[in-house]
Image: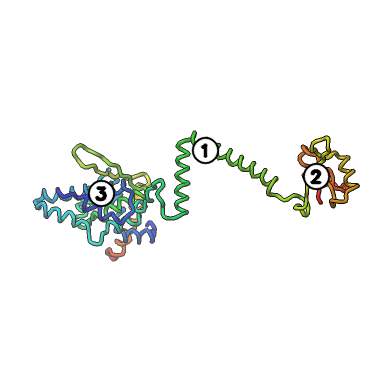
Amino acid sequence: MPDWAQHVRPRLSSLRLSPTRENEIVDELSQHLEDRWRELVASGASEEEATRLALAEFRDGNLLARYMTPLRQAHAPAPITPGAPAGDAVCDLWQDLRYAARMLRKQPGFAAAAILTLAFGIGANSAIFALVDATLLRPLPFPDADRLVMVWEQTETSARARVAPLNLADWNERNRTFEVIGGFVPNVGGMVLSAGDGTPIPSRASGSR
Amino acid sequence: MTDINTRALDRELKRGSAELLILSLLDARPRHGYELSKLVHTRSGGQLTFHIDSLYPLLYRLEERGWIKGTWVEKPDERRRRYYRVTAEGRRVLAQQRKTWAAFVEAVRRVTGDEHA
């Protein structure tokens, strides 16, 4: 008996059937041809003649593929192979996202660990960036901030230290070097004391030339 | 007389009422594709024939619409066969199509019959 599958399968090659569906159709049509062939042989046809007549059920022009083209099953999406490029960046991204979502759903413990790791990572990065921004990136709230200098108090008998408020006021009165001297009290959130004329200003700097 | 849905009639004529034939045959009991093609041929006295390349796409289309349902049946030492049966939705469609065809046949009979009888 002929191998009917080799006559059926090529007629489906232009369709985008899933492999499972294609095998089902090949099986079903092969059974049909086999039934027809047996019937013809039983009625007296030679095996060759029966084969020819059975295959004559397929008319010219591959009508099978043409009639099946509008069906949904003839447009099955290509199977997803993890890591294999789909040929388009957006498709690749969408494919990867769907794959990741499926994997996370299948392993909730791993998903929770991954989400917590991401949360801690993002939180730590945000905190570090806020610190860098406040101390290094953001300009000081003074005009001509590049002319600011820090003034400390140091005597022959004492180490360098912060300036006492009364000394600051005293220096301001006698100052001929700086345009103005301001001050701040540490450990209160970097908020202000005053500028040289006593106007409150937000500052971490202590004076300017 | 039942009003004939013109669009439905045109569609049925174009398709040669193939859907109606298949649903009618499956309404009695589940059958496989080859049995369906044999029944159409013999019951129509050889006037109607389903070729393999039109019968199976039709069955698959009816299945995609939910009008019939195919099930594989395996028997020892035999190739598996796919039997089709009519679904509840298929029976509803069949009833509607039978009405449409009955109305069509009646209309044709009135036109072509002996109107002076």
Q: Mark 1 Cα within 10 Å, few/some/many (few <14, many 20+)?
A: few
Q: Position of residue A167 (x, y in %)?
A: 87, 41
Disc 3 chain ID: A
Does label 1 or label 2 sit earlier along the sequence? 1
Whether labels 3 and 1 share one chain: yes
Q: How many marks?
A: 3
Q: Is residue B106 left or right of residue A175?
A: left
Q: Check disc 1 and give the amino acid type.
A: Ala
Query: Could you tell me which secondary element the residue under label 1 belongs to?
Result: helix
Q: Position of residue A198 (x, y in %)?
A: 88, 46
**Residue A165 seen in the figure:** yes
* Disc 3 from disc 1: Cα separation: 45 Å
Query: Could you tell me which secondary element the residue under label 2 belongs to?
Result: loop
Q: Which residue is mark 3?
A: A26
Figure check: A69 above or below A202: below
* Disc 1 from disc 2: Cα separation: 49 Å
Q: Check disc 3 and give the amino acid type.
A: Val
Mark linked to residue A151: 2
* Disc 2 from disc 3: Cα separation: 91 Å
Q: In the image as oriented, which residue stretches furthest toward the front?
A: A156
Q: Which residue is mark 1?
A: A114
Does label 2 or label 3 sit earlier along the sequence? 3
